[in-house]
Image (cartoon, rainbow, N blue to C red):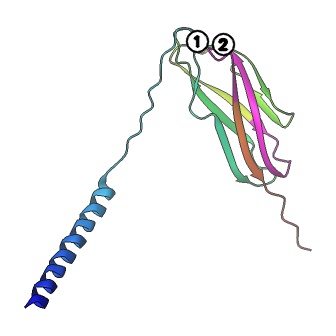
């Protein structure tokens, strides 16, 4: 009799435990996480980047080295970018010529010379009239693969 009760209890426990796990898996599949970023307004010009690092990943030798840093002026006054400077001659940034209005987006382009083989990490220094951050350092990184040897 004890064996039958023990077997019944183990069976009931096993069934309820497996149903609970199945429900958890179903719930995990239907749950969506929404991440929102709240941009804080500043008094004066402001500059908030969507990404401060661009990862080129692994790219081919002489591949397109153009990328863009997108930012928003989160301030109350126009943002003026006075200078952008790459950390070496292989990193060439482009600067917006016009002031960026409050709430508007802007783009800083950067071109890396992908004729240089191997891993790289370079920076672009942005100088502006942004309140509290007159200079901002952005990073690019990646790895340029060598050309595959040609077969004769």
Residue 71 position within the rendered picture, expressed as x and y whole percent measured from the top left? 58, 26
Q: Position of residue 145 (x, y in %)?
A: 79, 57
Nearest the viewer among 19 and 72 is 19
Residue depicted at 68% across the width and 27% down the height: 108
* Image location of residue 2, percent across then percent down: 10, 88
Q: Answer whether residue 93 is visible to the viewer in this image.
A: yes
Which secondary structure, mark 2? loop
Residues in magenta, as a range: 111-137
Q: Is residue 128 magenta?
A: yes
Where 55 falls versus 47 (above or below)?
below
Left or right: residue 145 versus residue 40 is right
Distance between the Cα atoms at labels 1 and 2? 8 Å
Residue picked out by circle 2: 80
Residue under circle 1?
A: 45
Q: Residues within 10 Å of mark 2 (few under 14, many from 20)?
A: many
Q: Position of residue 73 (x, y in %)?
A: 55, 18
Q: Earlier in the sequence, mark 1 or mark 2?
A: 1
Asked where in the image residue 15 lies, by quadrant, the reply is bottom left
């Amino acid at each position: 009799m004890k064996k039958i009760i023990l077997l019944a209890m183990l069976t009931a426990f096993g069934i309820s435990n497996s149903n609970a796990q199945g429900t958890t898996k179903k719930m995990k599949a239907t749950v969506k996480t929404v991440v929102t970023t709240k941009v804080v307004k500043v008094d004066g010009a402001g500059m908030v980047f969507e990404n401060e690092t661009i990862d080129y990943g692994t790219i081919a030798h002489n591949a397109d080295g153009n990328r863009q840093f997108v930012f928003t002026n989160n301030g109350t006054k126009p943002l003026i970018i006075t200078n952008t400077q790459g950390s070496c001659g292989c990193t060439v940034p482009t600067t917006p010529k016009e002031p960026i209005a409050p709430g508007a987006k802007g783009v800083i382009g950067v071109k890396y010379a992908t004729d240089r083989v191997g891993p790289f990490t370079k920076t672009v220094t942005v100088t502006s009239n942004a309140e509290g951050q007159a200079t901002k350092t952005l990073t690019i990184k990646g790895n340029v693969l060598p050309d595959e040897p040609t077969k004769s």
